Structures are given as C-alpha cells and as structure tokens.
Amino acid sequence: MQLFWELLIELVALLAGALAMGLIAQRLKQDAIVGHLLAGLALGPGILGLVRSLNLVMGLAEIGVSLLLFTIGLEFSLPKLRAMGRIALIGGGLQIALTILFAQPLGALLGLSPSGSLAMGIAFALSSTAIVLRIIAARGESDSPYGRAATGVLLMQDLSLAPLMIIMQTIAAGKEGAAGALAVLAALGKALAFGVVLYLVLRNVLPWMVRGSSPQLLREAPVVLSIVTCLGCTWGAHALGLSPALGAFLAGALLGELPYAHQIRADIIPLRAVFVTVFFASIGLLASPPRLQDVGAIAVIAVAILSINTIAATLSLRAAGLPAAVAARAAIVISQIGEFSFVILTLAQQSRLLPPQKASLMVSASVLTLLVTPYLFWVAPRLAALFVMRPDLEKPRDLSANSILIAGYGPAGEEVVHTLRAHGFEPHIIDLNPKTASNHVHYGDASQPEILTEAGLTHAKGVVITVPDPAAAAAIVRTVRAIRPEVPVIVRSRHSRSAAALLSAGATNVVDEERTVGRNLSKLALQLFRPTSARSDGQQT
C-alpha cells in the first residue's frame, strides 16, 4: 500500500512539473511539449531525482503514445490526402525516403551500425505535426502555398507511421536483408488482416449493438467506445507481434469514418492531454542532462537534423511541382524532429540499436530543434528567397489602358477577374499554382520584381492582391510600391489583425474579410429578424 502512495505522489509531481513548465514555455513563445520534455529532465534521476518509478511512468507513457496515435488516426482522412494530391503523395513520400537516405552518412560518422543509422534516419524523417500546424494556424497561413505544402507533407508522414513502425520493429528484432524484408511483408500482412477484421466489426457489429439505445446512452457511449477500442486494439496488435501504437492508429483511422467520430474527438481530447503530457515528460526522464563537453556535439547534430530535413523536403516538393521558393519555405518550417521521433529513438535505444550515450545526444538535439521551431517560421521567408529561380515566362503582351494586375487566382481571384472582364477591363493574372498556368495566367511569385514587371505592372491601371497569406500579400505590396509608388493597390485580408500591417506595407485599400462578413451577416439578420410590423412587404411570418 505504501508503494501505491509513493507512485501516486511521483505521478502527481511529474504532471504538476510538466504543467508548470508547459505554461512557462508558452509564455516564452515555445510549444508546451518543450516544457513537458524539460520538466521530465529536471524531475528525473539526472537532476532532482523526484521521480524514480520509471517503470510505472513508462507504462503510462505507452498508453499516452497509443492515445496520441489514436487521435491522429481519428483526424486522418483519405479524402484530405487525395485533395493534397501530388504534394502529399510525391512530396511527402519522397521526403521520408530522402531524409532516411541522407541521414546514413551522419550515422556512419557517429559510429552507428547500419541498423542504427536506419533507425536514426526514420526518427529524423518525422516532423512535428502538432507544433507546425498550430503555428501555421495561429499565423493565419493555412491556405498559403507554403502552408498547404507543409500540411501535405505532414499528412503523408502521419500515414507513413504504420509502415515505419513495422520497419522499426523488424530491425529492432535484428532481422536484416532478405529475412528482414520477409518479416516486414509478414507484419504488413498481419496489419492488413487486423485492419480488415476491425473494419468489419466497427462497420457492422457496432451499429447493430447500439441500435435502439436511449439518447443518454448514445451520448455516453462514444467516449467509452473510444477507450475500449483504442486500448483493445493496442493489446490486439501487441498479441499479434505488431507495434501496439500501430493498433491504436488503425483503431482511430477506422473509428474516424463512423457517425460518432466528431463526438469521439471532442470527448477524447481531455484524456489525450493527460497521457500525452505524461509521455513527453517520460521522454525527458530518459534523457540525461547534457554534459558541458557534449554541448558542441548536440548543436552539430541539431544543425545536421535541420539541414538534412530541409534539403530532403525541398527536393521532394520541387519534384512534386512546387516553385523553389515555396518548396524551400515549407521545408524549413518542417525541418525539426517530431513527437514520434522520440518514440523511434526510445525504441532504438531499448533495442540496443543506439548506444545510450548517442541516443541521449540525439534526444537533446531533437529537443533543440523543437526549441528553434518558432524562429524557423521567422527565418524561412528570408532563406527561401535564396532559392528563387526566375521562371520561363511568356513575353509580355501589349497592354491596354484598362489592364489590371491580379495576384492570386483562387476563388476570390476568379471572382475579381470575372467581374473586371464583364466591365471591360483586361485582367493579367499571376499565380503560383502550376495547374492554373496558361496563356492567361503568369506562373510565378508575385513578390519578385521581375515577375511583376513581365506580367505588366509598369502599364497596369491598378493591382488587386487576393492571396490569403497575409505575409505574402504584404511582400507583394512592398514590391509593387518599389516599382510603381503611385498605382492603386487593393488587398484582401483574411483576418482583421492583418489589415493594419497591409496598410503599413502600402496598400491603398484593404478588404477585411472578417468585418465584411460581419456586416453582411448583420444586414441579413436585420432583414430576417426585424419585427414583422417593420417589414416592407407587410406579410406575417
């Protein structure tokens, strides 16, 4: 009984420390995950020694990993993957392969075995979906070209978790060459059979079980269903000799297609937060405080991680058809090590693929890459500008006095073009999407002076900027002003907070989407909801 209370107080101390450090990290504009990792490092045997029951903590961390993969499976969507098209399939798939390949020389320099180098490469290939998508959303750049590219690669990485975990499990068992390939195929076959059985149960047996149940039971059932399915599939995968985390991911992906998926996502988030916090704190417990003589090695490994990932992702996104500047910017912001890289590194250490000292250096370097992630977003546009290549544009056409330059040819841009043409204007369009490139659309980055000039800025009567990314829009405005200080410039602003920056950049007028939508909603509300006596038609509602 005394042991139980000792374990409980250690768990409470770990959670409290992770909470405090997570809040401090957020105040310092870091992700809470960084604080959780540092809390584990501080409370572990290496520094304060307040948490000594590592077996209990690691057991909880295993559950945390399963719940994290389960929620990723819930949010995973094949339609979303198809919508990303070449970016996800070619860009994401090639990024993983190239990162693993480029990491092999580093593994050799560190004195790792081929299997250890492969495990390290797999760890390097996974970026932080949670941190990157959170920052992109906070910056309002989810619909920007680089935001869509980064999302596509991250989505493919999530999809690749299952086969990568199988490969890791195979090499951890010491199987290489033909025997390793056969083991991977056998594991994939088991996983496929497991997924088919799970799919049949969830799609056929479950609806039959809940048919005719009371509304109260249907409200309570999803959270119980999610926990039972997640932990049950975790155990089932383990019993079949597969990765337990793989079972959790499959469970989430298949449950995500059910009608209860939205309720399950809403109910599982609080539980996920607790166990994921324990997981990252437990990773910190396993890490040793870096020695002074290791600081240089940690910095070199961190730079190597960022460099390898940036080069691999840039080449991959270029192969997917993206412009160099967009590919480089997306590659830079996803160059850090992700959540599941720690799972891979932990498994590699436990399987003796990585010596403890080398694994500790990599964990410390990985934490460092997470720490610099917010700054990667700041430096990415500046570094990406070095990758800009002048595209082979058509020669500028003779422009009429009524020519208008349009930057961005999404739905908003199409509407502007249609309206201008209907009123006798001649729109000249610049867009970064290769699919829209034609005799009527210039393909290129509108923030580059030569692109604007060749598209006809010097003779344009005005400029309309419809790109959703506020940073990109501001860059275009500044470039336009450097060439034509007097030309009228109208800019779209997706968020009210971006309007002032666009005006400061030199926009003549800014269309604030949030306020415009608010005015339209208010106008419609007054028309529909005003008292019946005030209606112009005099009809009763």
Image (spheres, rainbow, N blue to C red):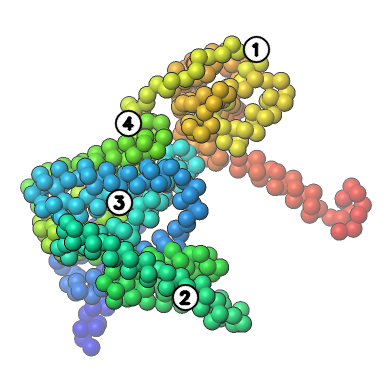
Determine the CA span between mark 2 and mark 4: 50 Å
Q: Earlier in the sequence, mark 4 or mark 3?
A: 3
513 displayed left or right of 86: right
Residue under the image location 51 percent in, 78 percent down: 205
**Which one is nearer the viewer's eye here, 538 or 209?**
209
Residue 344 badge:
none
Q: Residues within 10 Å of mark 4 (few under 14, many from 20)?
A: some
Secondary element type, mark 2? helix
Check the picture and name the quadrant holding the N terminus: bottom left
Give the x, y percent position of residue 155: 40, 51
Q: Residues within 10 Å of mark 3 (few under 14, many from 20)?
A: many
Q: Earlier in the sequence, mark 2 or mark 4?
A: 2
Q: Can the viewer see residue 533 in this picture?
A: yes
Determine the CA span between mark 3 and mark 1: 52 Å
Q: Earlier in the sequence, mark 1 or mark 2?
A: 2
Residue under the image location 75 percent in, 48 percent down: 524
Amino acid type, callout 4: Leu
Q: Residues within 10 Å of mark 2 (few under 14, many from 20)?
A: few
Residue at mark 1: 401
Residue at mark 2: 201
Residue at mark 4: 383
Q: Are marks 3 and 1 in contact (CB under 8 Å)?
A: no
